[in-house]
Image: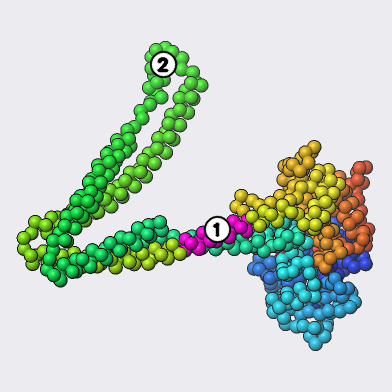
Amino acid sequence: MQLSRLYSNSSDIFEPIDFNSGRDADRLNIVIGEVHRPRDRKRDSHNLGKTTLLHLIDFMMLKGMSPDHFLAKHHDRFQNFVFFLEIALNDGDYATVRRSVESATKIAMRRHPERDQDFTDAADGTWDHVDLPIDEAVKLLDAWLDLRILKPYDYRKAITYFLRAQGDWSDELQLQKFQAGRDVYWKPFVAHLFGFDSRPVERKYELDEEISKLKHKQAEQQSEVQFSEDELPKLTARIGVLEQQMNLLEEQLDAFRFDDEERRIMRDLVEQVEREISELNERLYNIRYDVRQIDAALDHKDKFDLKEVESIFSESQLHFPGQLKKQYEDLVAFNRKVTHERNTALRGRRKTLNAEMAVIDVRKAELDDKREQQLRLLRSTDTFEKFKVLQRELAVQRAQLVYLEEQRRKLEQVAETAKLVRESERERGRVVDEIKTMVARPTPLFERFSKTFNAYCQRVLNHEGIFYFEVNSNGNFDYTIGLGLAGQVGQASGQGDGTSYKKLICALFDLSLLKIYENASFFHFVYHDGVFEALDDRKKLALLEVIREQIAVGKTQYIMTLIAADLPKDAQGDTLSFNDNEIILRLHDEGPSGRLFKTAEF
């Protein structure tokens, strides 16, 4: 798949661009910004439309039009434009896409056997498809392109790797459009692109999301329960004991016999109520002691007056060195910082202790009330009074049973969600192991790419080109790309982190990918915007040599933009010139006639 022709219904404003494609793909496609008035400092060879052309091509390859797209931002200027892109298909035919700015979501498409067609005046009846919604148009164009290598992904997933704009030179694989999104949207595709199975890569991200949602659900469920998941058996046992107590109490009330219940209450009073009250009193004492200690620590102020120290030195007629004074000042500042951090921690601790003390006070009041009622019952000799008290106790136990059974029901839901979390985490562990096994066995496709990429890096950058896949600390599929350290095979260096070398690595990466797929049903073009900008002339020439060598067989169409100032110079200082048949578009600084769109600036 290559670009053949781009034109519009307003050729006087946007002149047709005929790309060197197919039999002519062995020639470069240069978009150059020239300087015609070097003495006019108000003019510039930038901002003439080189990058805009890339965005227009992407638009014609059926990218959605966001509000910040130049056609949308300047809709009033372009609303009457209709654009046409002729594409060379891998089967030898051609496809033309018609898309207007005014009705950007209604696409017309037509297949034809000959190149260099002009369908600006073609009636709707001559098109194979008209008014296609953009989603359907993408599916149809994907079928016509027949990029089998990409399946199950469509061509839109990969096309921006071969339309590399200025913002895409910072990373070889994470393009600008992917940087705002999550890794799940592009890393599984990267795995697929290099012959790996993308399913475990994608499944790992799905499981991460699934586990995150389950844990959030578990936390919400747990917030409604006063018990932890591990306490479910204990809670069930407690409910069983309570039910047994209620049954015995009901039998005693029916028989008007209270001896057994009084003995149970006595045991509860001694073994439970009194013990818990004692424990709470001890805890309250410790909390109050801690709070007093914290208050005392917060009230303490460190006193160190540097002026007073200077005064003592002066009165003693001793010299107080400036360095010593600075050391004292640093010590005082450090002490203040430590004191501030300590006081912040102490206030937080005091707040926590006061909150715990309030909870204990409430519980202790409940227990004191319960103890009082139990003692009153045990001391009472009035049978009817005991009957009424025990009836109230039975009502309390029933209410407690209802509460505990509801708690158990909710806790069972927590336990079930926790079980699902554990099952998903076990599956995630298996998937991570699968990914590790996968990256440990490089595919033949990946090995061919690595060899090509390394060879290109050696030729252009004089460093080993390093590229490999791995599993990162989060268990996700990841990659490392860079340049090797001289004299240490396989050891990455920081050489590839600079802007210029990163750009070259990206360009060589794209070329390597096209090289290994040059005989497959895949993309066979790349658009590099400003690739020569800020590069050393020697690197420009080395890169150009690799490009010319690769396109010589006609299987890669190379489109590049540059300004005249970025044209490389040879060892003698002579500026390299391109043949006229390699320059598909000349832009210049002489007003509207030199811009992509022959209009005023926008």
What x and y, as percent, mark residue 272?
23, 52
Please name the residue shown 74% across and 41% down the image. Answer: 491
Q: Which residue is mark 1?
A: 425
Element class at badge 1: helix
Horizontally, is 401 left or right of 168 in the view? left
Q: Nearer the viewer, mark 1 or mark 2?
A: 1
State which region is magenta: 417-432
Extreme residue toward the bottom, this view:
125
**Which secondary structure is most common in the magenta stretch?**
helix
Residue type for callout 2: Phe
Magenta includes 308? no
- State the residue in front, 290 or 387: 387
Which image quadrant: the C terminus? bottom right
Instruction: Name which quarter of the figure residue 77 lies in.
Output: bottom right
What x and y, as percent, mark residue 177?
68, 61
Is label 1 in contact with label 2 (beta carbons under 8 Å)? no
Q: Categorize mark 1 by other alpha carbons within 10 Å: few (<14), some (14-19), many (20+).
A: some
- State the residue in front, 456 or 519: 519
Instruction: Find the distance from the CA under tag 1 to the CA under tag 2.
Output: 69 Å
Horizontally, is 40 left or right of 234 in the view? right
Which image quadrant: the N terminus? bottom right
- State the residue in front, 103 or 354: 354
Number of marks present in the image shown: 2
Element class at badge 2: helix
